[in-house]
């Protein structure tokens, strides 16, 4: 995927033409076509939800790659994570919406890593690789030029339809992100990650309480009410004892 250049020669991401067309055709007739389509019940419900979701419309209009960009904006508005001049690491950064929001805050350095290819974001270094691959993670960290002041993770495992399994798999990713944050964050730094509501967060919460001065749970308004996701916000990384 490539990004077009604007009149100033800067590369900007633009939503695909068919996405804009879909937004322009959100009529009763279009919804009836979706209802009468040959899609399965769950697929049809997903399409209908996308057509009526105000965050999807706003993301397209603002040029964000996903509605998840608004989750980060809301979290930052409440907890002030993305200060100007910081070094920000985004784990599992595809499709790039959180990188776009982070870039708006003019960080000193911004880097992301994901298994999937991610189109360029102005001001960000993006590494295609696994966060558990030491070499790939090291390349991402070196792009920051120093310890990160903020580590972000919106990673979630592919859903299986079994709530407890999905919860455990997503908690495992959150624990991976937390271990990276604890090992790499500058003193005073902050960590944000997604978790699913459930009963398997004990070890993760205990680790974060020991390593950070402040730990909060919060579900931003942009998170769908039916989703089990919530976010952990840890601030004030304590200095590592030697």
Image (cartoon, rainbow, N blue to C red):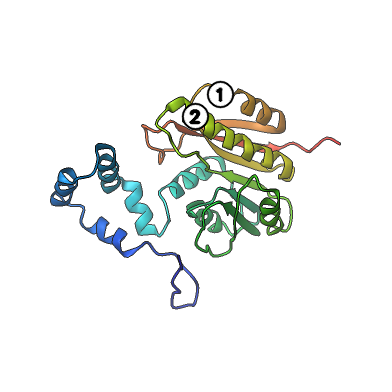
- Answer above or below: position of 60 versus 239: below
Residue shown at 83%/35% (left/top)? 241
Query: What secondary structure is marked by label 2?
Result: helix
Please, what secondary structure does the residue beneath circle 1 have? loop
Q: How many marks?
A: 2
Coordinates of residue 27 in the picture (x, y in percent): 17, 52
Left or right for 199, reference 50: right
User: Which residue is the site of mark 2?
Assistant: 167
Residue at 42% across, 28% down: 162
Which mark is drawn over residue 159?
A: none
Q: Which residue is mark 1?
A: 200
Categorize mark 2 by other alpha carbons within 10 Å: few (<14), some (14-19), many (20+).
Answer: many
Location of residue 52 in the rendering, given as x and y in whole percent from the top left corner:
26, 45
Which residue shows up at 53% across the image and 55% down it? 99
Classify 92 as above or below 170: below
| Residue 177 higher or lower than 147, as above or below | above
């Amino acid at each position: 995927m490539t990004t077009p250049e604007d009149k100033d020669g800067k590369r900007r991401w633009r939503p695909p033409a068919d996405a804009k067309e879909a937004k322009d055709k959100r009529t009763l007739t279009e919804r009836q076509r979706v209802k009468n389509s040959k899609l399965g019940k769950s697929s049809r419900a997903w399409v209908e939800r996308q057509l009526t979701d105000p965050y999807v419309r706003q993301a397209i209009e603002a040029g964000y790659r996903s509605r998840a960009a608004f989750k980060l904006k809301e979290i930052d508005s409440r907890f002030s994570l993305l200060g100007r001049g910081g070094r920000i690491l985004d784990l599992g950064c595809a499709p790039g919406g959180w990188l776009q929001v982070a870039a708006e805050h003019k960080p000193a350095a911004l880097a992301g890593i994901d298994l999937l290819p991610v189109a360029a974001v102005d001001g960000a270094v993006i590494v295609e690789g696994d966060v558990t691959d030491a070499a790939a993670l090291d390349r991402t960290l070196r792009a920051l030029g120093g310890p990160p002041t903020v580590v972000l993770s919106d990673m979630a495992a592919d859903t299986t339809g079994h709530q407890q399994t999905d919860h455990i798999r997503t908690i495992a990713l959150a624990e991976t992100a937390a271990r990276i944050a604890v090992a790499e964050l500058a003193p005073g730094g902050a960590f944000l990650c997604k978790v699913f509501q459930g009963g398997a967060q004990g070890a993760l919460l205990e680790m974060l309480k020991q390593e950070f001065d402040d730990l909060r749970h919060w579900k931003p308004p942009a998170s769908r009410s039916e989703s089990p996701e919530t976010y952990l916000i840890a601030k004030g990384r304590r200095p590592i004892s030697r």
